[in-house]
Image: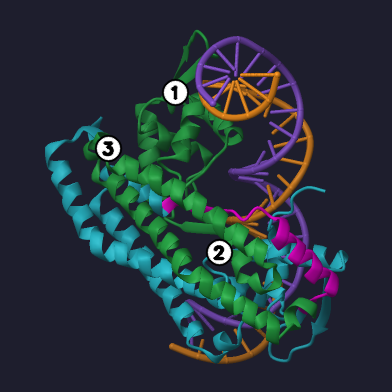
Chain colours: A green, B cyan, C orange, D purple
Amino acid sequence: MKQPHIDAKATCLGALMLGEASGYEIRKRFESTFSHMLDIGYGSIYPALAALERAGLVDVVEVRQSGRPDKKVYSITEAGRKSFIETLLTCPARHKVRSEFGMVLFFADLLPRERIDAVLDQRMVELTELADITETWLASDESRAAPAGIRFAAEYGLELINANRRFIRNKRSELTEQLAAEAGTTEKRNIA
Amino acid sequence: MKQPHIDAKATCLGALMLGEASGYEIRKRFESTFSHMLDIGYGSIYPALAALERAGLVDVVEVRQSGRPDKKVYSITEAGRKSFIETLLTCPARHKVRSEFGMVLFFADLLPRERIDAVLDQRMVELTELADITETWLASDESRAAPAGIRFAAEYGLELINANRRFIRNKRSELTEQLAAEAGTTEKRNIA
DNA sequence: GAAATCATGTAACTAGTTACATGATTAT
DNA sequence: ATAATCATGTAACTAGTTACATGATTTC
């Protein structure tokens, strides 16, 4: 057997460790609780849940609903819990970033001022949303009852969000001033 | 035409914006300069360079070397530069994180103390290496001559690295104490 | 009346990773 | 001796994304 990574299946198991949920609800958990670490879409979730069921790592109950579509509520089994813990124990604990945002800033001198402003503004909006979600959770009763790791991860996430906001707030004017100054003196890179 | 993302091809073009390089040297740039935003391996780089050449976005010169393998030095063409700038202008400026590290911490209460320690120690090593590389670059002459965006991105990266290190340094003992306390009182999640 | 939410799923496509293949040279 | 560095490339595999398909209900 090879090194198990945290793929879509393990990711779903992780979400189900917090309690039973439908595919749709699992997605919601990745927009809030897990948003700073992982993200998956429906196109990954539904096939993953089907595979987990076949493997006996989750149970399903179909729930009739009036007024809205029926749903399938999944819950993790004992075998699923074991498998998930095994993954957490043996996976390489990597931290990967794929930041198109960072690349745009890196090459800021090649781009018009409006693009840089738009990109920084948009990022600030995203960061503020994330900060709100996390702060709300940390202030909730749910958070007080949660295991230490979950609180730690949330506080860690919030700290990084705030570091991002602080940096952008404090340094963006410096960046735009320098870009303006450079554009005046050396036109090399834009024209080259 | 659809929205161009920063894929392996655009990523290579970005690396070549800093000057001509071989596939091997491009990889090096992603271990230092671009390490906090993107990462790609040889398996992505070589096919991408071949495709870029076919598209006329890069030029190649084969260079004979004595004592080491010959290499192919790639340089970006005018068309390549235009294409890259177009990508930067129109790509969605996302910032994606995939953190198995974060997931392990999130579920820390399910894992033995040694795993948590190992994961945090390893992360500190990585962060320290990255900080060293970035600090060295920021103190160099190269950095003083670089466009504002590049310095901004480097300072931004360093700030975040330091926020990570600070958080881990200040809060890890709190985490391990709480985990120890919880393990004593409630054994629910481990045994369930 | 339009938009958002709730809800599941598939198929085609895109794209990245890992392992393999090869091999000289240099530093420890 | 052994590991690391320099150097390129392919093939098979893995896995995620996007678009499509459908549709009732609720909120604005």
Mark 3: which amino acid?
Answer: Ser
Does the rendering let one see residue B28? no
| Alpha carbon distance from label 2 to label 3 | 33 Å
Q: Tag 2: Cα neighbours inside 10 Å, few (<14), some, or many (≥20)? A: many
Q: Which residue is at a point 34% across and 48% down the rendered structure image?
A: A154
Identify the residue position indicated by label 2 in the image: B37
In the rendered structure, the answer to whether residue B67 lies left or right of residue A132 reads right
Q: Which residue is at a point 70% across and 72% down the rendered structure image?
A: A110
Identify the residue position indicated by label 3 in the image: A140
Mark 2: which amino acid?
Answer: Met
Identify the residue position indicated by label 1 in the image: A74
Magenta highlight range: B73-100
| Alpha carbon distance from label 3 to label 1 | 26 Å
- Asked if labels 2 and 3 share a chain, the reply is no
Q: Which secondary structure, mark 3?
A: loop
Q: Which secondary structure, mark 2?
A: loop
Q: Are marks 3 and 1 in contact (CB under 8 Å)?
A: no
Quadrant containing the C terminus of chain A is bottom right
Q: Which residue is at a point 51% across and 27% down the rendered structure image?
A: A24
Q: Which numbered circle lies on residue B32?
A: none
Image vertical order of residue B138 relative to residue B6, above or below: below
Closer to the eye: label 3 or 1: 3
The answer to which of B60 and B94 lies nearer the viewer is B94
